[in-house]
Amino acid sequence: MSSAKERRKRLIRTMRRQPGQYRTGEVMRLYRENGWGPSRATARADLQYLARQGVLAEHGFSNCRFYTLNTRKDGRP
């Protein structure tokens, strides 16, 4: 399994166990705790990727955006 898939799976598992609002900084901390240590751009890209896939819902404006787990698999509210 690629490191990107592993990171994203871990992020989704964490969000299921600890629901809430996730921003780039929180995701970076999660990744560092697991030994990945990616850049801010990587954390942001993972969040955006999962939002495009319908796994996460995107909220807010570009300078204060946060993500939550989508409640439906098809990405609809």
Image (spheres, helix red, strand yellow):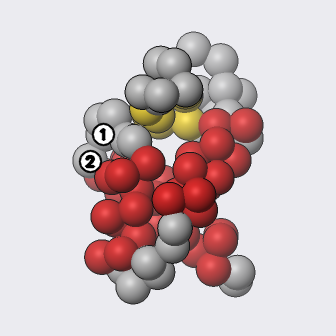
Pointer 2 local density, CA inside 10 Å: few below 14, some 14–19, many at least 20: few
Q: Using the numbered discs, state the Cα–Cα distance from disc 1 to disc 2 in whole angstroms.
A: 4 Å
Q: Which mark is residue 18?
A: 2
Look at label 1 and name its amino acid.
Pro
For image coordinates 65% across by 18% down, the residue present is: 76
Look at label 2 and name its amino acid.
Gln
Q: Position of residue 22 (x, y in %)?
A: 37, 41
Tell me where residue 66 sits by quadrant: top left
Q: Is residue 25 among what the camera can see?
A: yes
Tell me where residue 34 sits by quadrant: bottom left
For image coordinates 30% across by 39% down, the residue present is: 19
Q: Is residue 8 among what the camera can see?
A: no
Q: Which mark is residue 63?
A: none
Left or right, residue 51 beside residue 35: right
Question: Are dots 1 and 2 in contact, CB under 8 Å?
Answer: yes
Q: Position of residue 49 (x, y in %)?
A: 69, 47
Which quadrant is the C terminus positioned in? top right
Local SS, label 1? loop
Tell me where residue 37 sits by quadrant: bottom left
When the figure is inspected, residue 2 is found, relative to residue 66, above or below; the finding is below
Q: Give the residue pinned by disc 1.
A: 19
Q: Position of residue 32 (x, y in %)?
A: 36, 75
Local SS, label 2? loop
